[in-house]
Each structure stands twice: as C-alpha cells, then as structure tokens.
C-alpha cells in the first residue's frame, strides 16, 4: 500500500493563491516580493523564510489553522497554539464571553466554533429552543442542525425558505475560503434536510404580525422571523469574530447576536425578563 507524499509549502501556497484568484504577479505586488521569487517558492526551487510564509498567508487570507500547516510544510514550527476552550488558560476568555452573552439579554446571542457547534448561549437562545426534541438537544448542540432540521426551529421560522438560503450561502462562502472537510460534511447534511410542510415563503405574516413592514430594518437586511408562544418575533443577525487571533480555537469562534428588528419584538422580549 502506498501513501501520498505530503504537499510541499510551494504546492500549498499555489493552491491558496489559485483559490483567491490571484496571479503570481498580483501576489508578489501585495507581498512586496517578485513574481520570480513566488514562482521559485511554488515550484520548490526556493525555500521561503518563516517571515515570507506568514506574509504570503496574510495576503492570501489563509485561516490561522492552515497557516500552521504552511509553516510545518516549510520546515518551521507551528506559530499558533490550538488551546481547548476548557483549558485553564482560557478562563478569562470564557468569562468575557459569558459576560457579553449575559449582558445582551433578553435578546438572543450565542458563540459557535468553526463547524457551528454551540460553545455558549444565553437565555434568549434557550427561550427560542424551548420544546425542541431531545435528540436535537443531546450531545454537542449545532446551530445549523437546530435551525434547519425539520423537527428543530425550521417549522417556527416564517420566512424559512429565505433564511435557509441565506444560511446555506453563508456556509458555501466559508467552505470556499477554508475548504474545511468537516464543514463540507455538515453542509451536505443540513442541505439535504427536507423543507417542513407548509413552510411559508417571503412576506407572509404569522401570529401578531410583528415582523411586518413597520420593522426598523425591514428593508436593510434579511430578518429572521420566528414564532415563539404565539408571537412572531423578528431579528437581524450580526456575527463578530476576534481581531488578529493568535490561537486556532479563538480564531474559529464567532459570536452571533440577534438584534430585534421591530418594536413588537423588543416589547415581547422585555416582558419575559425577570
């Protein structure tokens, strides 16, 4: 049995360059190098310095996890740690995330990793998840499964076809950037879920009509229009990541906050606050 030889740093860099749609000349101009040197690196005729590997990775927008792979392929030690979130050294980060999520209540907010597993959530998210079947709540919670599964939140989302299209397109963009096999597997799984019977199309109203034309951002961003206990709530999603992360775990975290999109949603959520 034969095994494939590991890819060289030159081959990996060429793959990332082609993914980004850049020529050798364009990359050289951005990285303050020459197209000749880039060509020599890609063909293996020249070994790039550690600084050059990181500079090229930066201009190619290579994810932190894959920057480590580039460094190892070039014969250098990984630069970025991959610290489990439950490690004692991550205590300050965990506490900060918990304070952020709690401070956002009563509005929903959560933190997910690179494959949308939920690592933290506030009471606003738990409220939306009320009544979901146990098989979706056991094991690691996954935001995409919870949202798109026909026994999950999907039947409660009044613009489900639009929201489903938005989430799948978001995942497609991430796969194109990172080429993550686990994310691709998740995408194929959730994309194959059937659309719940009677899923409503865009512009249809539900109970209370809270997500109607008077929403403050109705024409600025696609809202998530989801029912809870007979009330139709409307949210706009915002996703934040950490700037210049130096750890793979931190680099792959995303904080999603759901901003109420109309006064009725604000009033309802505040009425539920203790």
Image (cartoon, rainbow, N blue to C red):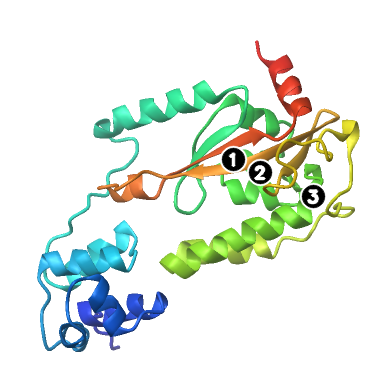
Tag 1 and tag 2, C-beta contact below 8 Å: yes
Is 45 left, or right, of 201 in this rendering? left
Is 112 left, or right, of 76 in this rendering? right
Residue 271's disc number: none
Tag 2's secondary structure?
A: helix
Q: Where 60 falls versus 200 (above or below)?
A: below
The residue labelled by disc 1 is 138
Tag 3's secondary structure?
A: loop
Say which quarter of the image contains residue 193: bottom right
**Quadrant where the image shows the C terminus:** top right
Q: Where 88 falls versus 46 (above or below)?
A: above
Is 74 left, or right, of 116 in this rendering? left
Tag 1's secondary structure?
A: loop
Residue 135's disc number: 2
- Cα separation, mark 1 vs mark 2, equals 5 Å
Q: Image point 50% across, 21% down: which residue?
A: 103
Residue furthest out toward the top: 274
Q: Which label's residue is closer to the chain start, 3 or 2?
A: 2
């Amino acid at each position: 049995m034969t095994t494939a030889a590991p890819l060289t740093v030159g081959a990996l860099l060429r793959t990332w360059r082609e993914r980004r749609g850049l020529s050798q000349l364009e990359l050289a101009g951005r990285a303050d190098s020459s197209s000749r040197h880039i060509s020599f690196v890609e063909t293996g005729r020249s070994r790039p310095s550690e600084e050059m590997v990181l500079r090229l990775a930066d201009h190619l927008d290579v994810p932190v996890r894959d920057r480590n792979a580039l460094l190892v392929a070039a014969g250098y030690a990984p630069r970025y740690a991959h610290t489990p979130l439950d490690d004692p050294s991550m205590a300050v980060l965990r506490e900060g995330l918990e304070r952020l999520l709690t401070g956002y209540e009563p509005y929903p907010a959560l933190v997910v990793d690179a494959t949308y597993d939920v690592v933290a959530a506030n009471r606003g998210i738990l409220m939306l998840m009320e009544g979901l079947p146990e098989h979706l709540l056991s094991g690691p919670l996954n935001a995409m499964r919870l949202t798109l599964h026909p026994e999950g939140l999907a039947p409660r989302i009044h613009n489900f076809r639009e929201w489903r299209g938005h989430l799948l397109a978001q995942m497609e963009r991430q796969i194109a950037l990172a080429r993550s096999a686990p994310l691709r597997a998740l995408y194929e799984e959730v994309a194959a879920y059937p659309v719940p019977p009677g899923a409503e199309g865009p512009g249809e109203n539900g109970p209370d009509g809270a997500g109607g034309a008077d929403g403050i951002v109705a024409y600025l961003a696609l809202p998530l229009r989801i029912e809870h206990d007979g009330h139709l709530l409307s949210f706009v999603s915002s996703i934040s990541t950490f700037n210049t992360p130096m750890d793979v775990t931190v680099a792959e975290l995303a904080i999603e906050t759901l901003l109420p999109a109309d006064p009725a949603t604000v009033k309802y959520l505040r009425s539920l606050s203790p």
